[in-house]
Amino acid sequence: MFKYAVLALSLVSVSVFADSTLGSMSNLPDVKSEAKRGLHGQVGLGLANTSEYIGAKNTENIFVPLLNVNYNDTFYIKFNRLGAWFYKSDNGFRVGGLLTRQAGYDKNELPDNLISKVGKEDTTLVGINAQYKKGLFTAEAGFLTGTGDNGNNDEGSEGGKLYAQAHYTFLATSQYTLTGTVKVSKWDKELVEYYYDSKGASTNFTVGLVGTYKLTDKWTMLGAVTATSLGDEITDSAIGEDDSSSMILIGATYSF
């Protein structure tokens, strides 16, 4: 069962992780999360400008799928996350499990002398998360650990990370929304060593804005910008070229 979930996540996110690190897609808040029965959500396409990899100085433009699909307010695919809620309370608190992908590096993104020094392939992260939502405010925290699914780690796991994030929609009308987000992510030393050949944990901070504009009952424009400040163990590594990573995205989604 687990391998099929990994395959499903890989299929829905293949274009997100094929050429760059759009891990910051998970920082985008869910600005339209009505609790409905059955299958519903938004699907679309976006154009993103983002760092070639986390810590890279150069950026690139790529097309990415915009997915925010729910089934019975229990199972969901959100951007680059596949998850399910196991417990839901009446006061807005819920607990669940999720899968996501940690992006690696393409060979053409690194100098030849550095390719062998870092783990460069994408890997699946699996974990648990808890969320609290009240009105226009949402807070979430979770823990994720590597599964060793890329076959390049004899120990079976590439490490893990803790995260905590909050979203607040401070402008909301029937036609548009504007939401702010903040996130803190703590990579453990194993995850940092695997991807950056650096000894020590790293704490990364992200801030962002996402806005939507309703064109019709079904079609919505979406724009987002995120900026991440990277920890010293990443920025001081052999492949760390910049102390921050950013993303700008514009796209459109269709609601069903």
Image (cartoon, helix red, strand yellow):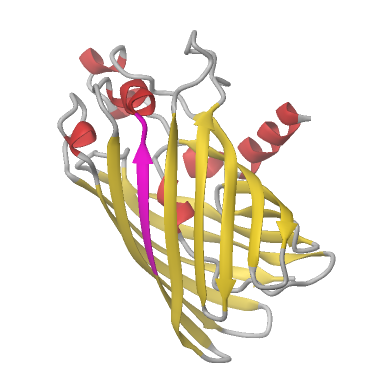
Residue 46, given in percent of the width and then of the height, sits at: 49, 60
Q: Is residue 249 above or below residue 209?
A: above
Image side of residue 102 versus residue 117, left or right: right
Single out the residue that lies furthest toward the right.
Answer: 38
Above or below: residue 92 compared with residue 214: above
Q: Residue at x 24, y 17 (%)?
A: 114
From the image, give the main secondary structure of the stretch colored magenta: strand
Quarter holding the C terminus is bottom right
**Above or below, 191 relative to 61:** above
Q: Residue at x 24, y 39 (%)?
A: 55
| Relative height, residue 130 to residue 202 (above, below) | below
Taking depth in this image into account, of 140 and 54 the one nearest to the observer is 140
Give whichever of 59, 90 is nearer the camera.
Answer: 90
Residue 70 sits inside the magenta stretch: no
In the rendered structure, does residue 182 fall within the stretch colored magenta? yes
Q: Is residue 60 visible?
A: no
Residue toward you, 204 or 30: 204
Instruction: Give the residue at x 56% y 83%.
Output: 214
Q: Within the image, what quadrant is residue 196 found in?
A: top left
Task: Give, as a single range, the part of the protein colored magenta.
Answer: 181-188
